[in-house]
């Protein structure tokens, strides 16, 4: 564990939050975190420190603006850069290029805390971290030194480009081509549903340099402003509105060969290794919102917290929350240790955590004045992105049937 990074996160967190009363912690101090769902259980003292910094940042810098970002479809650049000051721009990127050098488990703890402030914005931070890690891990020294420092500071933002109009779950069938001409690749094709598209600066692009199938795919880093790179219209979405989504279009786009990550034909492996990390970066606030609502909402002369059916539903939510958290953390540990079960645990974690989205707010949960509706809208897409949950089921069942 990078102790220097932990100290920096804690120190900067205190600086950013010093002038605020901590909204998230204040509510918990008043009512107390129920011990059975306490997210600090099982963590080291150092992990608890940066978890607290992330919770405080979520409460002060994200939650108060979550609804505005959603309604106005604002990409909160300055807030993201404040997060980067805490080391959240390159959480699991190596320190020699500006990253925090933390583990996958540490990362899952941070993302769970940040998601209580805004799921949509946290999801973009996760995607950005994934891209920075891919460059850090598969790039050479020159590529790492060129791209990673600015990404870790979020002076520049990154987008992950795999999905195409005709290839989603079947990613290995992608059609975007990259033909080598001298010291450049000439890209032609398009990518669909790209988070940050048009507003970000660095595009990690999977493209076809060889024959059909996964072995014909390579990975190129395309910089904004490259001739031949353009963007589609900004998509109107149900959720995830604090990050823009556009098509990314390549028309005879010349990219230097020096921007290729790894070798030709290694792109699909790089893409999948990136996604394994992205699949475990998801979250926790709905149980707290539901509990708070049951304690104050009255029907038939008493609070809903006295209704045994709703008590049971809340208990089930809390149980599934803790189960999700434990599965996510186990998957994170497996990924960090490069265990053989890492891919399947990451798939299980994404499947379970994103399928368990609940609401006991009745009609109030349908009003935009209540935060729960935004959590529901923002969380829904996690069942689709980075491999649909049906694909997660395929990965898990294939492993079970193969090994048996």
Image (cartoon, grey):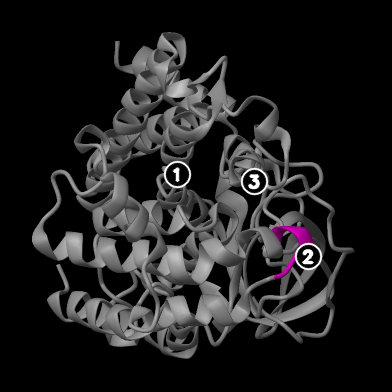
Labels 2 and 1: the sequence-earlier one: 2
Vertical relation: 372 (above or below) 303: below
According to the picture, the residue beneath numbered tag 2 turns out to be 72
Name the dominant secondary structure of the magenta segment: helix
- The residue at which mark 1 appears reads as 285
The alpha-carbon separation of the residues under discs 1 and 3 comes to 11 Å
Q: Residue at x 24, y 42 (%)?
A: 38
Q: Earlier in the sequence, mark 3 or mark 2?
A: 2
In this orientation, which residue lies closer to the viewer: 264 or 337?
337
The answer to which quarter of the image holds residue 400 is top left
Residue numbers of the magenta segment:
70-74
Helix, strand or loop for disc 2: helix
Label 3 close to label 2 by CB (< 8 Å): no
Q: Is residue 71 shown in magenta?
A: yes
> Which residue position is annotated with label 3?
374
Contact (Cβ within 8 Å) of mark 2 with mark 1? no
């Amino acid at each position: 564990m990078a102790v220097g990074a932990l100290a920096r996160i804690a120190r900067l967190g205190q600086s950013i939050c010093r002038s605020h009363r901590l909204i998230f912690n204040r509510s918990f101090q008043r009512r107390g975190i129920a011990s059975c769902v306490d997210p600090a259980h099982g963590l080291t003292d150092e992990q608890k420190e940066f978890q607290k910094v992330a919770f405080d940042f979520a409460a002060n810098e994200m939650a108060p603006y979550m609804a505005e970002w959603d309604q106005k479809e604002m990409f909160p650049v300055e807030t993201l850069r404040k997060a980067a000051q805490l080391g959240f721009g390159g959480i699991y990127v190596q320190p020699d290029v500006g990253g925090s050098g933390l583990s996958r488990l540490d990362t899952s703890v941070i993302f769970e805390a940040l998601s209580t402030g805004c799921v949509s914005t946290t999801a973009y931070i996760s995607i950005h971290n994934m891209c920075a890690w891919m460059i850090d891990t598969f790039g050479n020294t020159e590529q790492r030194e060129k791209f990673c420092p600015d990404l870790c500071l979020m002076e520049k933002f990154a987008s992950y480009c795999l999905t195409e109009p005709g290839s989603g779950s079947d990613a290995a069938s992608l059609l975007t081509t990259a033909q080598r001409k001298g010291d450049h690749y000439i890209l032609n094709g398009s990518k669909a549903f790209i988070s940050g598209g048009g507003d970000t600066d660095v595009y990690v692009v999977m493209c076809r340099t060889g024959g059909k199938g996964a072995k014909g795919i390579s990975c190129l880093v395309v910089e904004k402003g490259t001739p031949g790179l353009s963007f589609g219209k900004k998509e109107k979405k149900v959720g995830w509105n604090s990050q823009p989504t556009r098509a990314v279009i390549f028309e005879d786009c010349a990219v230097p060969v020096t921007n290729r990550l790894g070798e030709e034909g290694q792109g699909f492996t790089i893409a999948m290794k990136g996604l394994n990390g992205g699949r475990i970066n998801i979250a926790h606030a709905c149980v707290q919102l539901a509990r708070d609502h049951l304690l104050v909402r009255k029907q038939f002369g008493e609070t809903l917290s006295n209704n045994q059916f709703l008590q049971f539903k809340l208990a089930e939510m809390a149980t599934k929350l803790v189960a999700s958290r434990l599965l996510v953390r186990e998957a994170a540990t497996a990924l960090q240790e490069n265990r053989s079960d890492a891919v399947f645990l990451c798939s299980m974690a994404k499947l379970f955590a994103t399928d368990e989205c609940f609401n006991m707010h009745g009609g109030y949960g349908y009003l935009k004045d209540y935060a729960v509706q935004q959590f529901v809208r923002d969380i829904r897409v996690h069942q689709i992105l980075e491999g649909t949950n049906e694909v997660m089921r395929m990965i898990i069942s294939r492993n079970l049937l193969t090994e048996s």
